[in-house]
């Protein structure tokens, strides 16, 4: 209560300063009158008593000041005076304000943007009720890397036996489906979940409800908020209505809350259906009765009186019980808990490491900006030496000067922080609207939330202190004789290595490191674009469909794909067409361990990439056939045939002719009918993988693909015209089919190079910003040096120095700093390059072109930054310079 009363009294005093002074005057007069009366009673005359009482009190204004200083409002008033004084001074220096705000703003914007990603994927809890008590259960096997999903029987047993949870739900991470009606059919991705999924998540549904316990296998659906808005126009009466969903009729029970993307922060499901409906939407869906088929992810809600450690201890006991009752499948298992919404442990470490690396890079950019600002403030402080000396001579303290100058730098940094936040709002919007070139939906919906704002504020204050402390310390301790004459001791001859020079060296060094990294990644991108893929990308168009989400049986899918291929072949300009379950350089298809029947063990690993292909596949892609024949119209029930690449022949047959031989995938046997040249399979920079191509007619029934089928056509003409014609032919066969991934193979290759392009662009932007800031800093130092050495330059020219000699003098001083920066920066860049070896394509970390070009480019920029001030120096009028007050 005392603190609150003090706060209220202080606010009143600040708002009514005159009234407070009047009250103090009245109180002091009352005290003097009382003291005088006491003295009169002791025998003094009234006049003498008044004089004595006033003498005891002392100077009234001094007393009032002491009373005012005892409250917190005095410090607040002093702070406000500092703010007002700082703003008045900065208004008179718009150039400085602009330079500092832009410099700090660029650095803060980069940091805020990257931290917004960290906030979403690392720091933010799942958007559920009471996120602290919601966990994800993972399973760990002996010798396995953490972590694995659960089988359905294990999930059921945990739900029944674990008493630490109020509820345990499960969901299948991604299933595709098709929505039609109202507009063009559309493929969407969602999740299949147990009936208690929304109850365990404790979601407040904006519309309708989740699932009930009786709807485990019912045709009901919960729409994601964005799908509801985009596809159904935010219809407020959607709950209870039916929709056409993958050829079936589903009833909408509700809409998920805005921002809810499930319990996985990185995926972007757009609907939820009961787990029992998964077989209807997914051909060859996981078998729920299998105990060793781990396909479910489980979410569990802790009881209010149970800690995470206690729950883990109980799950450990449950795992031991499973090992005894189900020793064939559960021996050696254990369970692991993670907060719901956190990154999956298996991939989370790599993502966090990548984000940490990006955070370090953007902090380097901010360091460059801080060095630039510190240089500007040092120059400003040197210009104010005379002012500071006068203020000290008039009774001011160094602490007051230090506080004033430090406060000025913090105010400037906060202005830069505001500018940085505004820039990061644009950057995060652009990032959120970007879609990664991957076949599954990924949520990049980052935003500037309260964590980002708090981080930005702290970073701005820190940057202001870092930038301003040394300039403020120097400015508050002027050398009085020199300062009163307006001299800067650090700019005099003999002081070559000033603090400003050190800061410029640091800026250029860090910029060189960033530019070398950008150069390496750019060279890597160039090398990746030149890597031989093994197929011809020019003149190739493709699109994809997923008939199985429309309820097509394997036989109907075969018939549909053959009919589409026939229709596409008949289109004008099409020379050849084919169908497949996966495109090369799409991240990889399914792989499995194979064995060559009657042959020794393969050389190296036996893992083989598995593709489905129709007749004409290799001709369409331009992959040369080495031996054997192409696929025909194989009967789905006939003995299975396959075509292999040369790498598989080398590994499994030691280079011998494999035609007619048998290779086995589990219980499935394939007769090899052909051999083709090697192609890149998963990524552009990978080591060559063995590949087995299976007849698509014979493989659909036993191994349906995850992401649908692609139809490719080689053409001579306009790609957009052909895509439209292919779309019309497909819709003529089935107007309900959703068509997606319509692009040329060249566009597909560009997407395959997304990662190296993204990294090289990112480092290029940061490196360019760093170089611009460093060159501005070098220019500022050299320009200031010229202004402080004007008299010296005038004397040199008066004694006969040529203009060219003066220019060389200034350029030499500046280039000395740049050369030292290169000497320091190249080893640092080489060390960073060594750490980046694993993500460089066809480029050595010690790439000679990069490590020659970048330093030369940086020296050229530095030369320009020095040359401009040197021209100014060469134009100094000796007479005017000699008249200057030294």
Image: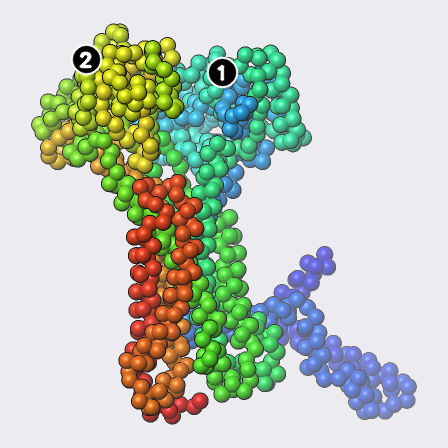
Q: Secondary structure at mark 1?
A: loop
Query: Could you give the CA–CA distance between mark 1 and mark 2, rounded to whole angstroms?
Result: 37 Å
Residue 740 position in % (x across, y down): 26, 29
- The quarter of the displayed image where residue 881 is located: bottom left
Which of the image's four quarters has the N terminus?
Answer: bottom right
| Nearer the observer, 504 or 198 | 504
Q: Is residue 790 above or below residue 615?
A: below
Residue 353 position in % (x across, y down): 47, 42
> Is residue 43 in view from this perspective?
yes
Q: Secondary structure at mark 2?
A: loop
Residue 227 position in % (x across, y down): 36, 32
On the image, numbered disc 2 is attached to which residue?
A: 633
Q: Residue 332 vs residue 764: left or right?
A: right
Q: Is residue 2 above or below residue 73?
A: above
Q: Is residue 451 above or below residue 563?
A: below
Q: Residue 620 vs residue 529: left or right?
A: left
- Residue at 41% over, 20% down: 220
Q: How is the image coloured?
A: rainbow
Q: Label 1: few (<14), some or many (≥20) within 10 Å?
A: some
Question: Do callouts 1 and 2 mark residues in contact (Cβ within 8 Å)?
Answer: no
| Residue extending farthest right | 42
Which of the image's four quarters has the C terminus?
Answer: bottom left
Q: Which circle's residue, 1 or 2, is located before the other in the chain?
A: 1
Residue 92 position in % (x across, y down): 42, 76
- The quarter of the displayed image where residue 690 is located: top left
Q: Residue 600 vs residue 58: left or right?
A: left
Q: Label 2: few (<14), some or many (≥20) within 10 Å?
A: few
Q: Is residue 441 above or below residue 52?
A: above
> Is residue 695 in view from this perspective?
no
On the image, numbered disc 1 is attached to which residue?
A: 292
- Residue at 40% over, 68% down: 817
């Amino acid at each position: 209560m005392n603190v609150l009363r003090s706060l209220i009294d202080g606010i009143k005093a600040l708002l009514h300063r005159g009234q407070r002074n009047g009250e103090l005057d009245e109180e002091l007069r009352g005290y003097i009158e009382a003291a005088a009366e006491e003295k009169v009673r002791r025998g003094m005359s009234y006049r003498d008593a008044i004089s004595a009482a006033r003498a005891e009190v002392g100077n009234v204004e001094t007393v009032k000041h002491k009373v005012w200083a005892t409250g917190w409002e005095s410090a607040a008033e002093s702070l406000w005076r500092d703010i007002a004084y700082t703003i008045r001074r900065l208004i008179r220096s718009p150039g400085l304000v602009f330079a500092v705000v832009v410099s700090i703003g660029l650095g803060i914007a980069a940091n805020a943007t990257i931290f917004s990603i960290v906030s979403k994927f690392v720091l933010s809890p799942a958007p559920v009720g009471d996120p602290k008590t919601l966990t994800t259960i993972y399973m760990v096997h002996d010798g396995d890397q953490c972590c694995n999903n659960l089988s359905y029987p294990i999930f059921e047993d945990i739900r029944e036996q674990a008493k630490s949870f109020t509820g345990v739900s499960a969901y299948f991470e991604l299933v595709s489906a098709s929505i039609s009606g109202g507009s063009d059919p559309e493929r969407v991705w969602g999740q299949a979940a147990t009936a208690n999924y929304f109850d365990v998540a404790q979601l407040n549904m904006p519309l309708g409800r989740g699932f009930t316990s009786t709807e485990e296998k019912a045709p009901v659906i919960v729409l994601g908020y964005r799908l509801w808005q985009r596809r159904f126009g935010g219809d407020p009466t959607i709950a209870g209505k039916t929709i056409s969903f993958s050829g079936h009729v589903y009833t909408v029970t509700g809409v998920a809350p805005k921002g809810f993307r499930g319990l996985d922060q990185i995926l972007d499901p757009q609907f939820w259906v009961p787990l029992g409906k998964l077989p209807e939407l997914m051909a060859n869906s996981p078998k729920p009765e299998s105990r060793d088929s781990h396909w479910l992810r489980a979410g569990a809600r802790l009881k209010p009186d149970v800690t995470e450690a206690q729950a883990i201890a109980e799950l450990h006991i449950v795992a031991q019980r499973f090992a005894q009752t189900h020793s064939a499948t559960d021996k050696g298992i254990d369970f692991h808990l993670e907060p719901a919404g956190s990154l999956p442990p298996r991939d989370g470490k790599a993502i966090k490491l990548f984000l940490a690396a990006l955070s370090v890079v953007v902090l380097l950019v901010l360091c460059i900006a801080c060095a630039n600002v510190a240089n500007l403030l040092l120059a400003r402080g040197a210009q104010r030496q005379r002012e500071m000396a006068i203020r000290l001579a008039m009774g001011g303290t160094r602490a007051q000067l230090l506080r004033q100058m430090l406060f000025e730098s913090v105010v400037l940094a906060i202005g830069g922080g505001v500018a940085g936040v505004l820039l990061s709002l644009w950057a995060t919007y652009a990032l959120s609207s970007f879609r990664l070139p991957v076949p599954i939906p990924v949520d990049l919906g980052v935003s500037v939330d309260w964590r980002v704002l708090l981080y930005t504020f702290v970073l701005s204050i820190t940057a202001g202190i870092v930038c301003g402390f040394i300039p403020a310390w120097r400015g508050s301790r002027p050398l009085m004789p020199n300062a009163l004459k307006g001299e800067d001791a650090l700019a005099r001859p003999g002081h070559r290595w000033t603090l400003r020079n050190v800061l410029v060296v640091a800026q250029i060094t860090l910029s060189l490191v960033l530019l070398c990294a950008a150069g390496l990644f750019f060279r890597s991108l160039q090398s990746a674009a030149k890597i031989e893929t093994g197929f011809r990308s020019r003149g190739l168009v493709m699109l994809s469909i997923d008939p199985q989400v429309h309820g097509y049986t394997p036989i109907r899918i075969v018939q549909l794909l053959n009919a589409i291929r026939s229709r596409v072949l008949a289109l004008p300009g099409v020379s050849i067409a084919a169908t497949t379950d996966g495109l090369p350089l799409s991240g990889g298809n399914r792989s499995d361990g194979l064995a060559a029947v009657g042959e020794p063990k393969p050389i190296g690993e036996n893992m083989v990439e598995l593709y489905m292909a129709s007749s004409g596949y290799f001709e369409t892609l331009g992959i040369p056939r080495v031996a054997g024949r192409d696929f025909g119209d194989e009967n789905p029930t006939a003995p299975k045939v396959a075509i292999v690449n040369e790498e598989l022949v080398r590994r499994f047959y030691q280079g011998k002719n494999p035609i007619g031989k048998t290779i086995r995938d589990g219980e499935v046997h394939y007769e090899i009918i052909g051999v083709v040249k090697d192609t890149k399979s998963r990524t552009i920079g990978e080591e060559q993988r063995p590949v087995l191509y299976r007849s698509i007619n014979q493989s659909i029934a036993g191994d349906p693909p995850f992401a649908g089928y692609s139809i490719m056509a080689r053409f001579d003409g306009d790609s957009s015209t052909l895509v439209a014609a292919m779309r019309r032919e497909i819709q003529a066969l089935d107007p309900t089919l959703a068509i997606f991934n319509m692009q040329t193979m060249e566009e597909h290759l560009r997407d395959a190079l997304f990662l190296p392009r993204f990294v090289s662009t990112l480092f290029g932007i940061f490196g360019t910003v760093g170089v611009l800031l460093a060159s501005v800093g070098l220019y500022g130092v050299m320009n200031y040096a010229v202004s402080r050495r004007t008299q010296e330059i005038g004397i040199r020219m008066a004694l006969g120095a040529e203009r060219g000699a003066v220019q060389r003098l200034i350029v030499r001083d500046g280039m000395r700093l740049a050369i030292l920066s290169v000497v320091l920066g190249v080893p640092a860049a080489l060390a960073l390059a060594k750490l980046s070896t694993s993500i460089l394509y066809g480029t050595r970390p010690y790439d000679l072109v990069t490590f020659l070009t970048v330093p030369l480019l940086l020296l050229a920029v530095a030369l320009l930054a020095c040359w401009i001030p040197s021209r100014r120096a060469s134009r100094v009028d000796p007479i005017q310079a000699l008249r200057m007050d030294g």
